[in-house]
Amino acid sequence: MAIEQKTEDSSRVGDYWKEQFAKNRADASLWTNNPIIAQHIYRLISDGSPQHWLPWFLNDYLSPGVVFEKSLSVCCGDGMHEMVLANSGRVRFVRGFDISEGAIAQARQTFQNAGIPPESYRLEVADANNLELEDTFDLILSTGALHHVTNLEGLLTTLSKRLDAHGYFVVLEYVGPNRFQWTDAQIGVINGILRQLDTRHLKDNARKELSRPSVETMIATDPSEAVRSEDVMRVLEEHFMIEYRRNFNGTVMHQLYPLLNDQLTTAGDREFDNIVRLILWMEDVLIREKVLSSDFVFAICRPKNVSASAGAVASHPREYRYVGFIDYYDGRNIAGWAANVTGTDAPVTVEIYVDDQLQATGTADGFRQDLKEAGYGDGRRGFNLALPENAAPRPLSELRVAGSEQVLSTRRAVAFGGTVQP
């Protein structure tokens, strides 16, 4: 009976997603289809770049000489991300799988229409909950797939065994409440915003309120939707070392945007666009201040033993493998963190540049519990620096590592009316 139920659920999931990818791209009410929101997400993921996260990873995060022999895409759908890989010149062979036969048929047709040589890709039907792989991959991609997987432990065990010792596992994921059972805090904030807006800014010019969907409705529509989303990061961290992680929020905007009048963005309504920006800013603040948790995460993962692997440092995208972020900047004081992820516990010396001029230098050795919990050694990776008193305040600051040209993060000063995340 359990096997029959699993087969029935798999068939329903496959049928649902046969047309869903194309529908999502055409759906103006989907939050990520709003260009203001999309660029905000990309900036959160990359610490400032407005370009799509996949070209950013391939062309900016990775060094120019990195070329992958074979990639694997988990639940690739109709193959849009795989087309980017195939056309990038950075991946020699692209492989992807999805439970939906219809989606895979569309992906194959897309590749054929684009003239991609058939010997350079393989797109197949397979179930992530019962995945068997014989190959090894140096790049694995999972974009919104893991929160649809019931057997997370089995899938991630398989992927960890099949990821090359110097490989990358890139994850873009929903990690919010299971089955979209939004928290009281989320619902309260969203409905509070809806009550403040003029009805012309609302869908169908009607004031509605957000409520939790019933679990029964969720299962009837798509049995896989957010089935174990709350477990994704925990299980991911059990199987991989997370080298780079950024929240891209969605805790408010994901559910709120479908209730807004998206036609106003299409029409170029500046007032509506500014409301969208204001909501994004508010969401940033609520998550930064830990009033809400981010429902979406971007992570670049490596094998657990990558820091001890011969040649691992040379394969990393950045010369010294630094990561960091500016959490606060008011034109006079700046705080954040920086770390070297090659395995050394030595603190990083950071440099603060304003208008491309060095303004402050310090050691990132302050204790931060959040960094310790995220796996950055003993957590002593924070800094809090003051700019010189005689320096004229400027709105934009950059964080760099001493002796490196790598810009880890940029931030606009709150005193100059900048956003929390430029």
Image: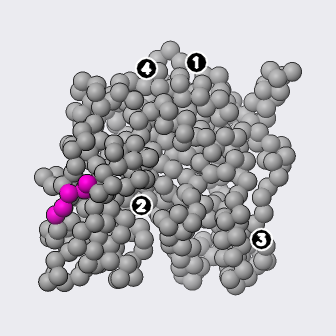
Q: Main secondary structure of the magenta part?
A: strand
Q: Mark 1 points at which residue?
A: 132
- The crowd level at tag 3 (other Cα within 10 Å; few <14, some 14-19, many 20+) is some
Magenta-drawn segment: 361-365
Disc with the residue nearer the chain's start (3 vs 4): 4
Q: Mark 3 points at which residue?
A: 209
| Residue on which the image places disc 4 | 136
State which quarter of the image contains the N terminus. top right
Q: Position of residue 167 (x, y in %)?
A: 37, 30
* In magenta stretch: residue 363: yes
Instruction: Give whichever of 368, 178 is nearer the camera.
Output: 368
**Looking at the image, is mark 2 or mark 4 earlier in the sequence?**
2
Residues at marks 3 and 4 touching, judged by CB atoms closer than 8 Å: no
Residue at mark 2 to residue at mark 4: CA–CA distance: 32 Å
The answer to whether mark 1 and mark 4 are in CB contact below 8 A is no
Quadrant occupied by the C terminus: bottom left
Tell me which label, 1 or 2, sits earlier in the chain: 2
Residue 9 is left or right of residue 355, and the answer is right
Q: Which of marks 2 and 3 is nearer the N terminus?
A: 2
In terms of secondary structure, where does tag 1 sit?
loop
Q: In this view, does 276 lie to the left or right of 407?
A: right
| Residue type marked 3 | Glu
* 393 lies above or below 149: below
Going by the numbered disc 4, the residue's amino acid type is: Thr
| Disc 3 to disc 4, C-alpha distance | 48 Å
Q: What is the crowding at mark 2: few (fewer than 14 residues within 10 Å), some, or many (at least 20)?
A: some
- The local secondary structure at tag 4 comes to loop
Question: Which residue in the protein does label 2 denote?
Answer: 43
Percent position of residue 370, x then y: 43, 53
